[in-house]
Amino acid sequence: MKSQICDLLGIEFPLVAFSHCRDVVAAVSKAGGMGVLGAVGLTPEKLEIELNWIDEHVDGKPYGVDVLVPNSYVGKGENLSTDDLRAMIPQEHREFRADVLEQHDLDAADLRDNEYSRKLETNSNGVLGAGLDGAKEVLEVAFAHPISLVANALGVPPKWMLEMGKANNVPVAALVGAKQHAVKQAEAGVDIIVVSGTEGGGHCGSVSTMVLVPEVRRALKEYGDVPILAAGGICTGEQMAGVMAMGADGVWCASVFLPTTEAETSDNIKEKMIAASSSHTVRSKSRTGKHSRQLSSPWVEAWEGKDAPEPLPMPLQTMVSEPALKKVADQAAIGHEGAKQLETYWVGQGIGLVNETITAGQTVQKFKEEFIDSYERINGFFSDN
């Protein structure tokens, strides 16, 4: 296709797929799009293993890496230890997470506060891993591989990241959820702006994709032809055609790949996603302290209740939630019914348009077919016949 994104990234079809699963990354790239591996929570050693595997299985096709370097979080620039951060967590939050699990017949005494919970909270700070202090080391690993894109979520990439991208001739992308954020990214020299509407899974703003894409395109005119990837609830080729008509040069997708056969999601989560409608997601601070969209479940609903403690800022809320959610996932995997009900995952509203489990490669092919059908339908409005 003729698209700035295809030219810049060296791909055939302007679909970029974010995934924590290396199999999905390789499959999408081989199908003509570009897979981007989410490196959040990966140590440099683990990332090296993952990228070696992708190099061996991607058939030389382009792929990218996504890191998380938030502009704001508790302790930024203060050189706080994990113990310092743990000391900021009110006991009320530990008690609440344990209560929610115990209401669903899960043993959660170890989540209240003991040596085991301290270990879990320490490990959970690593969920943000590269996003806080270790991003440079992680990116050094990434740039030692033939990556074709590096992306950052939650703010303008730091100057050193942009410089690393230029030094390695790798475009740098950044996610935005508001027009003014897109302008800041363009002023900073970001190569690709991912315009993510509130419908998207994970961290998201409050403006819809339908409004945000043309709003950003218009705002960026004075900065030149900055490539835009539209994101947020996009799970079909029809939607892809629509946002490209509104000014995007391609799409950034994630949720549509979560129910695929290769994805890292559990069978329970896959089943929930296939059964979900667009109303079965909720935008909540309960998981990370910043608004993120996820599958609705009793866990999320409890944190949104009037008796729930106020979610803590990032990364403290992550340290509260992840130990509990890991216990939930582990128990759900062995069939515990209460845990299966509680289990949740980040996903966008577009999941209501996904009603089958197919491979990641088949998903890309389906996008292509739906895109062509939509293109022909639009052309039909101008036909004399």
Image (cartoon, rainbow, N blue to C red):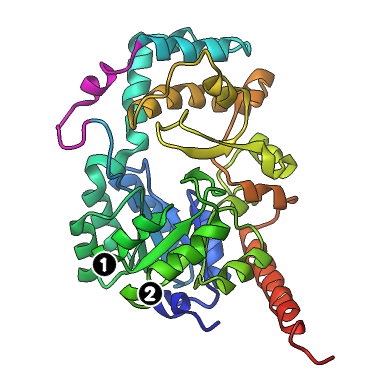
| Depicted 3 relative to depicted 264: above or below | below
The C terminus: image quadrant: bottom right
| Depicted 176 relative to depicted 298: above or below | below
Q: Position of residue 125 (x, y in %)?
A: 32, 30
Choose the circle earlier in sequence order: 1 or 2: 1
Q: In this view, does 123 lie to the left or right of 14?
A: left
Magenta stretch in the rendered image: 75-90
Identity, as a three-letter code, of the amino acid under mark 1:
Gly
| Depicted 174 relative to depicted 381: above or below | above
- Neighbour tally class for label 2: few under 14, some 14-19, many 20 plus, Cα within 10 Å: few
Q: Where is residue 362 in the image (x, y as percent from the top left)?
A: 67, 63
Q: Does the magenta stretch include residue 88?
A: yes
User: What's the mark number on residue 208?
Assistant: none
Tell me which corner region of the image, top left, top right, bottom left or bottom right, holds residue 83.
top left
Q: Which residue lies furthest to the bottom in this view?
A: 384
Q: Is residue 366 left or right of residue 313?
A: right
Q: Which of 152 and 358 is in front in this view?
A: 152
Q: Position of residue 94 (x, y in %)?
A: 41, 13
Is the stretch drawn in magenta largely helix, strand or loop? loop
Under circle 2, the secondary element is helix
Label 2: which residue? 221
**Residues at marks 1 and 2, CA–CA distance in whole angstroms:** 14 Å
Marks counted in the figure total 2
**Residue 325 visible in the snapshot:** yes
| Depicted 113 relative to depicted 10: above or below | above
Label 1: which residue? 189
Residue appearing at x 67%, y 72% in the figure: 371
Q: Nearer the viewer, residue 121 or 78?
A: 78
Residue appearing at x 58%, y 41% in the figure: 265
Residue appearing at x 47%, y 7% in the figure: 109
